[in-house]
Amino acid sequence: MSEAGTMAIDAVVFDAYGTLFDIYSIAAQAERIFPGQGQALALLWRAKQIEYTHLRTMSAMYKPLWEVTQDALVFCCKQLRLDLSLEANSLLMGQYARLPAFPEALEVLQALRARGMKLAILSNGNPQMLSNAVAAAGMHTVFHHLLSVDSVKKFKTAPEAYQLAPDVFGVPVKRILFVSSNSWDACCATWFGYTTFWVNRSAAPLDELGVTPHGSGRTLSDLLPFLDAA
């Protein structure tokens, strides 16, 4: 789907987790450790991680995403009555540190660079998490900036977090295309003023927030025809 306007796009900014890197791939590792519970743990872990980022930002109690992710894992194992040994914890957090990129991601990023687009990641991840993930995916030469909310000590959807990209690129926010696989993120970025694209991999319903991203598709590859129409 595309509702692109006529305004030119100067830069494309990507959410990282779930958009470029496959969070739910961790279910396979979780299944090996906790047979029959891998998928449930992966889903609950992600939901609790996001919930904790929102709660910490609302309460002005920031701590880096790596630590938030660890806290969420501990809670979820308690909730599911799973014995999180030190070894299991190390394996799961280690897997999170090297999440695979979606198969089309690098090709799409390279195509955007070939078009002369300036590219960045804008993520809740702390700087070390982002640099490790980007390097592991062979994307270290693609991005102009890796923007972490750690610099403002507030997670998305705080305005200060979304402001990082227009500040670093020095262009109006509407001329930046913000790409996320998280409905809440794409919607709130639209509120902030970005041109937005929702990568809806699971054909999920849009969050009922009274706002709609400017475009959507099933994979990152759908970005290219959306930009052609912009």
Image: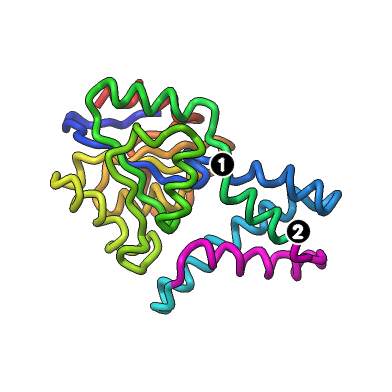
Q: Pinpoint residue 57: horizontal percent, then vertical percent.
A: 41, 71
Q: Is residue 83 magenta?
A: yes
| Residue at (35, 21) in percent of width and height | 111
| Residue at (24, 56) in percent of width and height | 163
The 10 Å Cα crowd at callout 1, few under 14, some 14 to 19, many 20 or more, is few
The residue that disc 2 covers is 88
Q: CA distance from mark 1 to mark 2?
A: 31 Å
Looking at the rendered image, the disc whose residue lies closer to the viewer, 1 or 2, is 2
Q: Pinpoint residue 74: horizontal percent, then vertical percent.
A: 68, 68
Specify the segment rendered in magenta.
63-87
Quadrant including the N terminus: top left
Q: Nearer the viewer, residue 223 or 136?
A: 136
| Residue at (68, 54) in percent of width and height | 92
Q: Quadrant of residue 58?
A: bottom left
Image vertical order of residue 168 relative to residue 160, above or below: above
Image vertical order of residue 8 relative to residue 76, above or below: above
Image vertical order of residue 35 relative to residue 81, above or below: above
Q: Nearer the viewer, residue 81 or 228?
A: 81
Q: Pinpoint residue 56: horizontal percent, then vertical percent.
A: 46, 73
Image vertical order of residue 172 relative to residue 209, above or below: above
**Please, what is the three-letter code of the amino acid marked with disc 1?**
Ala
The residue that disc 1 covers is 204
Q: Is residue 176 magenta?
A: no
**Please, what is the three-letter code of the amino acid marked with disc 2?**
Ala
Chief secondary structure of the magenta portion? helix
Which residue extends farthest right? 35
SS at badge 1: loop
Total marks in image = 2
